[in-house]
Image (cartoon, rainbow, N blue to C red):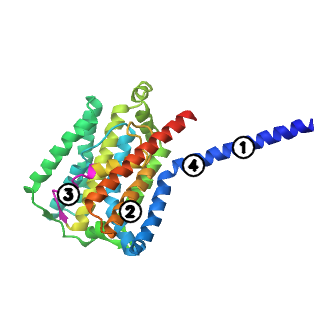
Amino acid sequence: MTASIGSTVTATAGKDGAARSRRGADLIVKSNLLLVFLALCVVASLLAPQFLTGRNIANLLQQSSLTGIVAIGMTMVVLTAGIDLSVGSVAAFGGMTIALLMAAGVPVVPAILVSVAAGAVFGAFMGGLSAYLSLPSFMTTLAGLTAVRGLTYLLTDGKPAEASGSEAFQLLGGGFIGYVPIVGIIFVAITVLAAVVLRGTTFGEYVYAVGSNKEAARLSGLPVRGLITTVFAVSGALAALAGVLLTSRLTVGQPTAFNGLELDAIAAVVLGGTNLFGGRGGVFGTFVAVLLLSVLRNLCNLLGLGSFFQMVVTGLILLVALVLNMLIERRGARA
């Protein structure tokens, strides 16, 4: 009997140990992006000693924040199994709009609100077309990419617009608190707010439900069309906000700004582990991915490597990320 008890205790301990090993392995798998980011930072500090200087880190955060803000909105869209290719054009429109409003004498706060609201309207319109007419979001936002960019050029006949009338406005996109850029604080705040909404509210639960199975969500009585329209509106608003912040930093609105931004945002979302078919992922993964891509490009610049090399490396990293995400999904399915 004693031997039997001993065998039971040993078996139980073995199962507990195996369970702990599985949990440890799962944690490593789920944290792979963060581990890669930390490893890249270590490598960057060894290869380029100037990488860890306060000025370089501040510039890195400032440069990555605009793409990051847009990528947060893109994450919410992708979680519903959609895609938003218009964010670059909407961002440029937002930047031009606030420049023109300020040149016309509109106070800073109302000008910002109008510019961001315009982005939300564009996003809601394209999202509504996709949701209510059952059009692929890829096509509606591709049309938006062209149309909104053309509208941006029409605002000033393709010419830049000055926006240097307010020092407070300039601080919003170009100011620092110590070594920390204000735009970086805005990026972090938006990330935390989006995470709370997605993980701690009914709206967030609906987003994941729609992305997991749109038809099942509809049959369950969820407002699928309205929810899709809303996440596209959020994406448009955040894109316009990024445009406002760039105009603040440059003190000029550029109609050619943000060309290719949609590709950078999608790359960060995919690298961050959000499933392109919806229902899985989150904004913290996107946040880390944005920083990782920025560190990689920063390191290439510090080492004197050209932009063509950076494109090749970025593409390879995205390919590896897709493979890792596939392995994670298969591991979860077997569990």
Residue 273: where, in percent of width, then height?
Answer: 43, 46
Mark toward the start of the polypeptide (3 vs 2): 3
Residue of label 3: 257
Residue drawn 47% across the image and 39% down it:
205
Residue of label 1: 16
Q: Are marks 1 and 3 in contact (CB under 8 Å)?
A: no
Give the numbered dot on residue 27.
Answer: 4
Distance from label 4 to label 2 (Cα)? 24 Å
Most foreground residue, 259 or 185: 259
Residue span colored magenta: 252-262
Frontmost of labels 1 and 3 is: 1
Mark toward the start of the polypeptide (4 vs 3): 4
Mark toward the start of the polypeptide (1 vs 2): 1
Residue of label 2: 295
Q: Are marks 4 and 3 in contact (CB under 8 Å)?
A: no
Residue 243: where, in percent of width, then height?
Answer: 25, 57
Check the image and name the residue furthest to the top. 219
Q: Amino acid at mark 2?
A: Val
Q: Amino acid at mark 4?
A: Leu
Residue drawn 31% across the image and 47% down it:
235
Distance from label 1 to label 4 (Cα)? 16 Å
Q: Is residue 288 above or below residue 55?
A: above
Frontmost of labels 4 and 3 is: 4
